[in-house]
C-alpha cells in the first residue's frame, strides 16, 4: 500500500489475544510472535517488531504499525510515537539503498559538505530525496561513529568507502549495477541469519518473582509504618 493510504493511526488496537494482523506476512508474523515471547511484557518487543516490519516493506508502513500495535497491545499512535523518535526507522518509502552521508564536525572538516553537494548533483536529488528509479535515497546524517574514515558514508547502515567524489561515483555505479548486493542487502534488512533457539521468557517465573517483590515491598512498608 502506498504512503498516501488513508490509514488512521489513532484508533485503539484490539487486545493482543483477539487481534488479527492483516499486513505482516505469515513468516514475519511467526518471527514476530517468537520475538514477543522473549520478553516479559509484549510491548517490550515493539522496536524489534518495527525492524521486522521495515525488513518486510523496506519502510515502516501505517498498516504495519497497526499490526504491531495489535500484537503488542498498544495503540498504533504509540507505535508511531516510538518509531518516529529513531532515525533508523523510515516512515515514508525509501529507495532500496539509503545512502547516509555524515556532515558532523569530523566529517565536515574533511569535506563532507562538498561531498554532499556532489552527491546531490550527481544523483539529481536533494538530501532526503529518492532517485527517480527509486533505487537510492540520499540523506544527511549526524555522526555515524566512523569519524576515523571521514567523510563517513553508509549504505543501509553499512560503512562504505566513498570519501571523494570519484569513490562516491564508483559506489553509486556499483549499487546501480547490483555489484554490492551480496554485501549490502535491501534497506530494512538488518541480519540474514537468525537464531533458531530462543530464550523465551518464563512468564510463571516472572509472575512469581513479581509477587515476591510486591510482598517484600508490602512488608517493608508495614515495618516503616510501625517504626514511625
Ligand atoms: S563526525 Fe562523521 S562519523 Fe563522526
Image (tube, grey):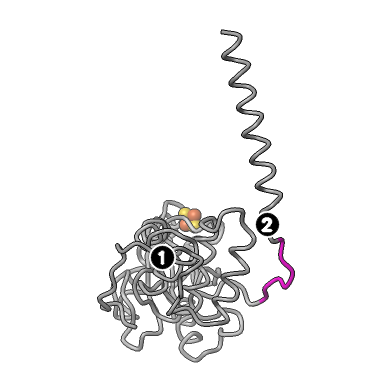
Count of numbered circles on the image: 2
Quarter where residue 82 is shown = bottom left
Residue hosting label 2: 201
Do labels 2 and 1 touch, CB within 8 Å? no
Please determine whether, in this image, residue 209 is positioned above or below residue 225.
below
The front one of 70 and 172 is 70
The front one of 178 and 71 is 71
* Direction bottom: furthest residue: 177
Question: What is the C-alpha distance between the residues marked 2 and 1?
Answer: 23 Å
At 50% from the left and 69% from the top, the residue drawn is 154
Quarter where residue 160 is shown = bottom right
Please determine whether, in this image, residue 224 is positioned above or below residue 141.
above
Residue 6 is left or right of residue 179, and the answer is: left
* Direction top: furthest residue: 228
In the image, which disc is placed on residue 22? none
At 49% from the left and 64% from the top, the residue drawn is 16
At 55% from the left and 88% from the top, the residue drawn is 179
Q: Magenta stretch: give its range.
A: 193-199
Looking at the picture, how far across and down is residue 96, in whole percent?
44, 81
Report the quarter where the N terminus lies.
bottom left
Q: Residues within 10 Å of mark 2 (few under 14, many from 20)?
A: some
Residue hosting label 1: 14
Residue 174 is left or right of residue 130, and the answer is: right
SS of the residue at dot 2? Answer: loop
Amino acid at each position: 500500500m502506498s504512503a498516501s493510504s488513508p490509514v488512521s493511526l489513532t484508533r485503539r488496537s484490539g487486545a493482543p489475544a483477539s487481534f488479527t494482523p492483516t499486513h505482516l506476512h505469515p513468516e514475519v508474523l511467526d518471527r514476530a510472535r517468537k520475538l514477543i515471547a522473549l520478553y516479559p511484557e509484549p510491548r517490550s518487543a515493539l522496536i524489534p517488531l518495527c525492524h521486522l516490519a521495515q525488513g518486510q516493506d523496506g519502510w515502516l508502513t501505517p498498516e504495519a504499525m497497526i499490526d504491531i500495535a495489535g500484537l503488542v497491545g498498544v495503540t498504533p499512535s504509540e507505535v508511531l510515537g516510538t518509531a518516529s523518535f529513531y532515525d533508523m526507522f523510515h516512515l515514508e518509502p525509501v529507495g532500496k539503498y539509503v545512502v547516509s552521508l555524515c556532515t558532523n564536525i569530523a566529517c565536515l572538516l574533511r569535506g563532507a559538505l562538498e561531498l554532499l553537494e556532489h552527491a546531490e548533483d550527481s544523483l539529481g536529488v536533494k538530501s532526503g530525496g529518492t532517485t527517480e528509479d527509486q533505487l537510492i535515497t540520499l540523506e544527511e546524517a549526524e555522526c555515524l561513529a566512523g569519524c576515523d574514515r571521514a567523510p563517513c558514508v553508509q549504505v543501509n547502515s553499512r560503512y562504505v568507502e566513498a570519501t571523494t567524489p570519484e569513490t562516491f561515483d564508483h559506489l553509486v555505479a556499483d549499487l546501480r549495477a547490483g555489484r554490492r548486493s551480496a554485501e549490502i542487502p535491501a534497506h530494512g534488512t538488518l541480519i540474514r541469519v537468525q537464531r533458531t533457539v530462543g530464550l523465551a521468557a518464563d512468564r510463571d517465573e516472572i509472575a512469581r518473582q513479581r509477587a515476591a517483590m510486591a510482598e517484600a515491598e508490602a512488608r517493608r512498608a508495614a515495618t516503616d509504618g510501625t517504626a514511625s
